[in-house]
Image: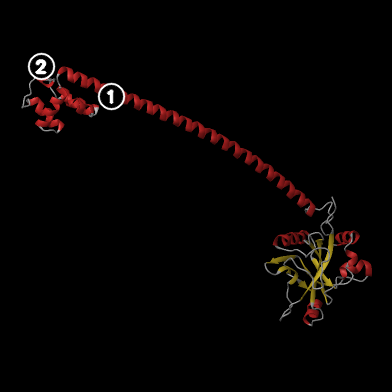
Amino acid sequence: MSKPAVKVASLAFEIAVGGNVPTEAHLLPVGPFRAGDGRPWDCDAWQLDATIAANVIQRLLDRKNDTLIDYEHQSLRSEWNGQPVIAAGWFHDMEWRDGKGLYAIGVDWTAVAKQRIADKEYRYISAVFYYYSATGEVLDVISVALTNTPAIDGLDGLDDDDGIATLSKRFSLPDLNPETTDMPRPEEELAALRVTHAQAETALAALTAERDTLNAKVAALTTERDTALGELAALNKQINDDRAAAEAQQKTDLITAALTDGRMAPALKPWAEKQSLAALTEFLQTTAPLPITERQAGAGHATGTAALTAEQKKIADQMGVTEEEFLATQKKHAR
């Protein structure tokens, strides 16, 4: 796995001076951002947001010593030019401000620096920072200085491996070596995302298989239900058919018995066959057998009487026919 390159860059803001020298300094803007001279050259832009800034701030807080603000970043050059490093101020905290960026706060300026800022001998505050060249993500602010040359010369020699290692040792900075740092590298993050993606695909495949199994079980249960409903419908039809046949047989038996014992004249048979079993049963329960002489008359042995017996009148009334209609029907069936 190739190492993610850590590089050094600088950016400067003009110091806003009002009535008093401010105790805060704007170090870096909200990302993505680029310098006015076109930097960075090795990535699309430098990246800084609230989450990235929180890591940068925590690295500052983890240091025991205050962070130096010097002049013209002499603290970065002293090993090479042998000149002394003179402090312009100190700070030990930074703050992220939405829409603005990263600020040094609680800056304790020296009296000389305050005067120089007030007299506009120095107009800019410059921050030098580490960043990942592959992504542009800001890693740490390693130097802050008053300057009049925002585009600082002489930093090119600091962004190789030896320069970065030397600066880290001099300023007690956290180890940013990609082999030992706890910060995830872009390729490591990509590998982790691929593992997560593979796990998600495996989980999705398992859920899909489980869904298909459940769908198959539902289909089988649906078929079983439909079969059971069909069998139930057939059984109900058989029961109803048997009940209807039994009822028809009972009605036939009642009519035969009623004709035999004289409770019903032969002329009433067509009417009786149209009645329900319950209605026919109720009728026969309230009807007394005809005398033998009337049964013979109803069967065609009489010469034709013009009057109905009391029982025949009762039957005619129940049938809803006149006496004449009853006698005509009786004669018709007597032939």
Quadrant for residue 246, please give it: top left
At which x and y percent is residue 97?
Answer: 68, 67
Residue 21 drawn above or below residue 195: below
Residue 223 drawn above or below residue 254: below
What's under tag 1, amino acid-wise? Ala
Callout 1–callout 2 Cβ contact below 8 Å? no
Residue under the point 80% across and 66% down: 67
Of labels 1 and 2, the one closer to you: 2
In this view of the protein, which residue sits in the foreground, 75 or 284? 284
Q: How is the image coloured?
A: secondary structure
Crowd band around label 1 with a 10 angstrom C-alpha radius: few (<14), some (14–19), many (20+):
some
Query: Residue tagged by mark 1?
Result: 248
Q: In this view, does 83 lie to the left or right of 48?
A: right
Quadrant for residue 54, please give it: bottom right
At which x and y percent is residue 233?
Answer: 41, 30
At which x and y percent is residue 187?
Answer: 79, 52
Q: In this view, does 80 lie to the left or right of 65?
A: right
Residue under the point 38% across and 26% down: 238
Residue under the point 22% across and 21% down: 254
Residue under the point 94% across and 70% down: 81
In this view of the protein, which residue sits in the foreground, 33 or 162? 33
At which x and y percent is residue 215?
Answer: 57, 38
Query: Residue tagged by mark 2?
Result: 292
Distance between mark 1 and mark 2 Cα atoms: 28 Å
Question: First in sequence: mark 1 or mark 2?
Answer: 1
Q: Is any atom of residue 53 visible in this view?
A: yes
Most extreme residue toward the bottom is: 119
